[in-house]
Image (cartoon, rainbow, N blue to C red):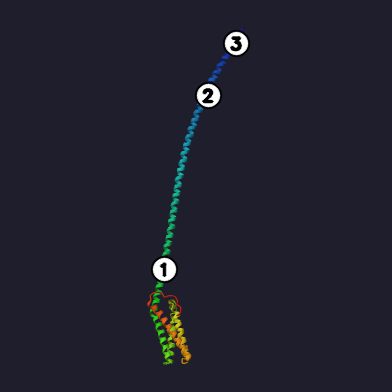
C-alpha cells in the first residue's frame, strides 16, 4: 500500500473517531438539555400552579368579601324594610284605633243626645199627663152628669146649652193634645166618647120627648157611661204611671 493509502485510511479513521465522539457528545448534550428543559417546565409548572393557587385564593377571598358585603347590604335593606313595614302597620293600627275611638265618641254623644231628647220628651209627656189629663177626666165626668140631668127633664134648654159648651171644650182639648193622646193610645177612647156625646145632644135637640127618642137617648147614655168609664180609667192610669204608654187600644 502506498503512503497515500495509509494517509487516507488514517484520515478516514480519524474522521470516523471524530464522528463517534460527535455522536457521543451530541447524545450527552441532548440528555443534559432535556433534563434542563424538564426541570424548567417542572419549575414553570410549579410556578404556574402557585400563581393559580394564589389567584384562586385571592379570587375566593374577594368573592367572600363581596358576598359578605352583599349579605350585610341585604340585611340592612331588609331590616330597613321591616322597620318601615312595622312603622306602617303601627300607623295603620293607630289610625284605625283613632277611627274606632272617634266613631265610639260620636255614637256616645249621639246616644246621649237621643237619651236627652227622650228624657225631655218623657218629662214633657209626664207634665202633660199630670196637668192636662185630669181636665179630660173632669170634662167627660161633667158631660156624663149633664147628660143624665137632661134625661131627668129639669131645665132641658139650659142642660142642652151647658152640654154643648162642655162638648166644645172637650173637642178643643182633643185638638190641642191630639199628639199626646195618640202617643198614649187613648185618643180613640176619648174620640168615641165625644162622638156619643154629640149624638146624644143631637137626639136631645131633635125630639127628646118622643118615645123613640127617649129610648135612643137611654141607649146613648148607657154607651156614654161605659165609654166615660173606660176613657177616664185609661187617663187616670197614665197620670199615675211614670212609664211610656201602650199603643192604641181597641174601643170597648
Mark 2 near mark 3, Cβ–Cβ under 8 Å? no
Rendered view: 53 above or below 97: above
Q: How far across and down, in percent of the image, does residue 187 sit?
A: 44, 79
Rendered view: 180 above or below 56: below
**Which of the marked residues, 2 or 3, is nearer the chain's N terminus?**
3
Residue shown at 56%/16% (left/top)? 20
Of helix, strand and loop, which one carries label 2? Answer: helix
Between circles 1 and 2, the one closer to the viewer is 1
- What number is the disc on residue 197? none
Q: How far across and down, in percent of the image, does residue 183 sit?
A: 44, 76
Give the quadrant of residue 9. Answer: top right
Q: CA distance from mark 3 to mark 1?
A: 147 Å
> Which residue is disc 1 drawn over?
111
> Which residue is disc 3 drawn over?
9
**Which of the marked residues, 3 or 1, is nearer the chain's N terminus?**
3
Residue shown at 44%/55% (left/top)? 89
Q: CA distance from mark 2 to mark 3?
A: 37 Å
- What number is the disc on residue 34? 2
How many C-alpha atoms fall within 10 Å of the one at disc 2: few (<14), some, or many (≥20)? few
Rendered view: 96 above or below 67: below
Q: How far across and down, in percent of the image, does residue 145 sit?
A: 40, 87
Amino acid at each position: 500500500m502506498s503512503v497515500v493509502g495509509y494517509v487516507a485510511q488514517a484520515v478516514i479513521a480519524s474522521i470516523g473517531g471524530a464522528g463517534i465522539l460527535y455522536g457521543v457528545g451530541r447524545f450527552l448534550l441532548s440528555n443534559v438539555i432535556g433534563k434542563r428543559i424538564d426541570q424548567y417546565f417542572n419549575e414553570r409548572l410549579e410556578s404556574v400552579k402557585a400563581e393559580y393557587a394564589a389567584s384562586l385564593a385571592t379570587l375566593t377571598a374577594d368573592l367572600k368579601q363581596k358576598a359578605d358585603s352583599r349579605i350585610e347590604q341585604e340585611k340592612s335593606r331588609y331590616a330597613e324594610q321591616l322597620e318601615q313595614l312595622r312603622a306602617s302597620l303601627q300607623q295603620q293600627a293607630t289610625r284605625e284605633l283613632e277611627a274606632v275611638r272617634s266613631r265610639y265618641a260620636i255614637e256616645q254623644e249621639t246616644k246621649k243626645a237621643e237619651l236627652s231628647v227622650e228624657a225631655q220628651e218623657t218629662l214633657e209627656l209626664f207634665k202633660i199627663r199630670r196637668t192636662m189629663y185630669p181636665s179630660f177626666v173632669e170634662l167627660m165626668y161633667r158631660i156624663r152628669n149633664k147628660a143624665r140631668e137632661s134625661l131627668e127633664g129639669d131645665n132641658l134648654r139650659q142642660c142642652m146649652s151647658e152640654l154643648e159648651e162642655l162638648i166644645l171644650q172637650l173637642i178643643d182639648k182633643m185638638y190641642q193634645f191630639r199628639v199626646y193622646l195618640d202617643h198614649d193610645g187613648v185618643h180613640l177612647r176619648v174620640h168615641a166618647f165625644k162622638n156619643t156625646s154629640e149624638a146624644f145632644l143631637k137626639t136631645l135637640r131633635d125630639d127628646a120627648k118622643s118615645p123613640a127618642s127617649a129610648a135612643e137617648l137611654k141607649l146613648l147614655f148607657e154607651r156614654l157611661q161605659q165609654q166615660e168609664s173606660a176613657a177616664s180609667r185609661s187617663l187616670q192610669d197614665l197620670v199615675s204611671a211614670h212609664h211610656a204608654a201602650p199603643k192604641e187600644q181597641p174601643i170597648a
